[in-house]
Amino acid sequence: MKLSLTAILLLLMSSCKQNNSDWIDRSKHEGLYNIGYSELFETYATQEEPKNIKKTVENLEQAKLYYDKVFSEDLAFAVLFVDNENWNDYAFSPPPGMPQAYYEGNIVLGLGKSAIAMRAEQGLKEMPKDNLEALKVHLGNNIDLDLFYRDALSLHELAHLYQFYRTGRNFQRRWFNELFGNLCQIGASKNLPTQEVFNQMDAYQMFLIKADRWGEINYTTLMEFEEHYFDIMKQGRNYGWYQTQFYEKAKALYANFGDDFIDSFRDFLIETKPEEIGNLSDGELQKLIRQKFGPEASEMLKWKYNTEVAHK
């Protein structure tokens, strides 16, 4: 039987899509409801009919279209909406509501009023009321921080999936992964139909940076970020401090170099996989960064907290 060229192309596309979706670890979906909230990716939840996530799903749909275009992909993935009570059954780290990406095709987001948002909102009550006015403009009079932790940061976690799909579990540095996530969340939010998500993200991040109320944090160097990553993540404040540093750098890099830089950044993550070129020393990595991105970008990537003396 002869097949037309169109039929062959459709078969090839179907085969590629099937292989693409095979990377998703479906063991993570056990016990969850398949809620079917999107036609572009899979959606699961700990509640049968969860409320207040339709906007999150819409933003992720737009972000997927953006990432697919930038990275020339059509990535299959699943989004798991998990409430506080069931968080530890599906996420790899507390606190409940801290968005996370697994290596095999799943991201985990909070559902309902997340513990991490409640904790952060409680902390805002210690701030002078005048300092909160800018946040109210973008996050509402009650300052709903799930708009940041679930809606804005979901773009960051989705970016990690586009990385992990090509790099797998191995990478040179965690801090480079996190800088990539921040770059992508800025690019994606800037390319949504409105600037609402970017403004929510930016207002809260810049508020944290300006307030500088981190208290006692234990780690500030990139080496410590590598060595104590999960401890830092669990501590919350220390992880937030690192992320604001990455965010500022990513914001400046995107403003200077745009979408092409994001694509080149992922290429670099793929090209420097340890199984391809081995484990790089800091000096070797910096040399490759300069070769790939040029002197201006490599200078912007430099980290100013290089010794333990910098601890706050």
Image: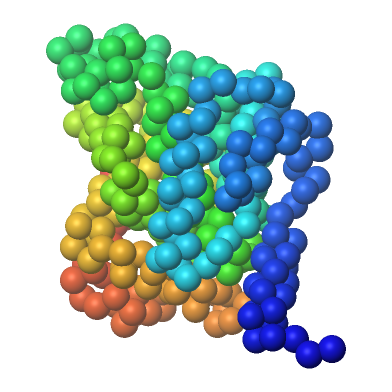
Q: Is residue 242 above or below residue 95?
A: below
Which image quadrant for residue 136? top left
Q: Is residue 258 above or below residue 182?
A: below
In this view, which residue lies farthest toward the left? 130
Judge left or right: residue 242 versus residue 255.
Answer: right
The structure residue drawn at horizontal position 53% and vertical position 60%, both measured from the top left corner, is 162
Q: Is residue 190 above or below residue 76?
A: above
The structure residue drawn at horizontal position 78% and vertical position 90%, both measured from the top left corner, is 2
In this view, which residue lies farthest toward the right? 1
Q: Is residue 234 visible?
A: no
Task: Tell me residue 251's x, y (percent).
Answer: 25, 51
Judge left or right: residue 15 versus residue 146.
Answer: right
Q: Nearer the viewer, residue 208 or 278?
A: 208
Question: How many marks can you see?
Answer: 0
Task: Tell me residue 245's x, y (percent).
Answer: 30, 46
Q: Nearer the viewer, residue 56 or 278?
A: 56
Placement of the N terminus among the 4 image quadrants: bottom right
Which image quadrant for residue 42? top right
Which image quadrant for residue 167? bottom right
Judge left or right: residue 237 versus residue 81.
Answer: left
Judge left or right: residue 42 versus residue 74.
Answer: right
Q: Nearer the viewer, residue 243 or 99?
A: 99
Task: Tell me residue 97's x, y (percent).
Answer: 54, 28
The structure residue drawn at horizontal position 60% and vertical position 64%, both measured from the top left corner, is 165
